[in-house]
Image (spheres, rainbow, N blue to C red):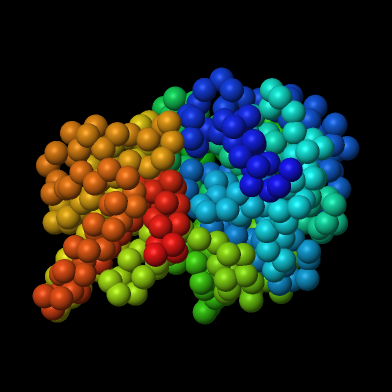
């Protein structure tokens, strides 16, 4: 079979959480089945060193910077993240050697795909198999959801990292930050160093208890100082926290020589969708932030950009769509009131219909645009009209990974 046919069959046979939600066939909590699957593959995850990263926000950025740093320090490094934006193969990479080849995807799925597995179990098995085949020295592995019951939790890493903790996927992970922290801390392993960001009063007791139970030396990233002048090319709010977490991990592991990788992490890994500038004129930014803590940071940054000190305000045009399970009520109060909104419905069974989203955002100035491409096209037309009047508009596209994915695909096709 050709690559396109095999990928089509993968998505048809195994529904993913991103598109179908937490149905019994898309989400299979627990690692017993993944352990059996890995055994059938010859336990490839045991043939390379790994770093395990969980968290509500920031884990993709931390994984990217870590993988780039390991690569620049001389290690052949794999990187497994999710979801993808445009190409399925974005999930499985070797730093500086790009994505898993199409032929290898076809080979794996023809040899090892089987009924009864979840989409994420298959892709995780593929990542481990390919990294072992490529004889990587190390791989940075991002959890899919939570930690304790995540398919990636069959690895025994060199260090377990938890980024920020916020309220997301509460129906599965718990309704408080403490409960969510406990699920994330399920990736702690006996004798393996654990790294968390800071001493938050809600999560610190949880992390300390579980680390003590597991015999995991616990470290706080806030205790480490990044060398002066070191910065990453990853844009967006909170990257200073992410960078400090990465530096802490490298320090704990005793790895040096990663600075150049950190500086050029986005470039050498192809990391996208995090405060990414898609167009310069009009300035068009996309970001996959989709929960209140991350969106609050983004909206604050936008408001600072549209109201610069000593200059006239800039018009703000927002293309926005969400999944049906998102906390729109919690997000609505964070959204800029003076923006023009083009509401869209991303593809997938989980998408919130535009009319439902409009009802929840009834106090904002919005247009019901429907499909993402239509919303992006209308927003850019509006921005160009504003530019012709001598104004300097900003377009922001976000609310969902799927909105960003469709926007990127649309803009790259026109």
Residue 216 is situated, as x and y percent measured from the top left of the image, at 70, 41
Relative to residue 209, is residue 232 depicted above or below?
below
Residue 26 or residue 243, whichever sits in front? 26
Q: Which quarter of the rendered picture does the C terminus lie within? A: bottom left
Residue at image location 19% in from the left, 63% down from the top? 382
User: Looking at the picture, does residue 363 appear above or below residue 228?
Assistant: above
Q: Is 41 on the left-hand or right-hand side of 278?
A: right
Residue 228 seen in render = yes
Q: Position of residue 159 (x, y in %)?
A: 70, 49
For image coordinates 25% across by 67% down, the residue present is: 394
Q: Nearer the viewer, residue 42 or 166?
A: 42
Q: Horizontal placement of 96 versus 221: left or right? A: right
In the picture as drawn, the residue positioned furthest to the top comes out as: 24
Q: Residue furthest right?
A: 42
Which of 280 and 220 lies nearest the eye of the viewer?
280
Q: Position of residue 364 (x, y in %)?
A: 14, 46
Q: Quadrant of residue 224?
A: bottom right
Quadrant where the N terminus sits is top right
Q: Which residue is rendered at x = 26% and y = 63% of the image?
A: 380
Question: Is there any visible trace of residue 244 in the rendered image?
Answer: no
């Amino acid at each position: 079979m050709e690559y396109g046919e095999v990928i089509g069959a993968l998505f048809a046979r195994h529904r993913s959480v991103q598109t179908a939600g937490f149905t019994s066939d898309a989400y299979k909590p627990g690692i017993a089945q993944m352990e059996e699957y890995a055994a059938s593959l010859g336990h490839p995850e045991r043939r390379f060193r790994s770093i395990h990263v969980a968290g509500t926000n920031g884990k993709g950025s931390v994984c990217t910077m870590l993988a780039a740093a390991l690569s620049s320090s001389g290690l052949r490094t794999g990187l497994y993240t999710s979801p993808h934006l445009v190409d399925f193969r974005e999930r499985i990479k070797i730093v500086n050697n790009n994505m898993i080849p199409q032929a290898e995807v076809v080979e794996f799925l023809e040899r090892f795909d089987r009924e009864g597995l979840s989409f994420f179990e298959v892709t995780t098995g593929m990542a481990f198999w390919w990294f072992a085949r490529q004889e990587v020295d190390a791989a940075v592995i991002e959890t899919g959801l939570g930690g304790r019951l995540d398919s990636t939790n069959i690895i025994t890493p060199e260090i377990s990292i938890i980024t920020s903790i916020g309220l997301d996927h509460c129906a599965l992970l718990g309704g408080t930050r403490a409960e969510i922290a406990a699920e994330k801390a399920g990736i702690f392993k006996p004798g393996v160093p654990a790294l968390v960001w800071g001493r938050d009063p809600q999560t610190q007791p949880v992390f300390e208890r579980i680390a003590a139970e597991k015999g995991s030396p616990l470290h706080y990233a806030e205790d480490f100082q990044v060398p002066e002048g070191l910065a990453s090319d990853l844009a967006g709010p909170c990257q200073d926290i992410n960078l400090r977490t990465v530096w802490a991990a490298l320090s704990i592991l005793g790895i040096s020589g990663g600075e150049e990788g950190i500086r050029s992490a986005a470039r050498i890994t192809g990391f996208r969708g995090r405060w990414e500038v898609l167009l310069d004129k009009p300035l068009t930014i996309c970001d996959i932030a989709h929960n209140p803590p991350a969106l609050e940071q983004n909206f604050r940054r936008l408001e600072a950009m549209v109201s610069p000190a000593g200059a006239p305000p800039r018009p703000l045009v927002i293309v926005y769509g969400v999944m049906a399970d998102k906390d729109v009520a919690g997000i609505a109060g964070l959204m800029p009131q003076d923006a023009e909104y083009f509401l869209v419905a991303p593809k997938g069974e989980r998408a919130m219909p535009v009319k439902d989203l409009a009802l929840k955002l009834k106090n904002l100035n919005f247009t019901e645009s429907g499909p993402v491409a239509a919303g992006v096209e209308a927003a850019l037309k509006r921005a160009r009209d504003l530019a012709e009047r001598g104004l300097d508009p900003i377009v922001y596209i976000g609310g969902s990974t799927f909105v960003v994915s469709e926007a990127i695909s649309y803009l790259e096709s026109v």
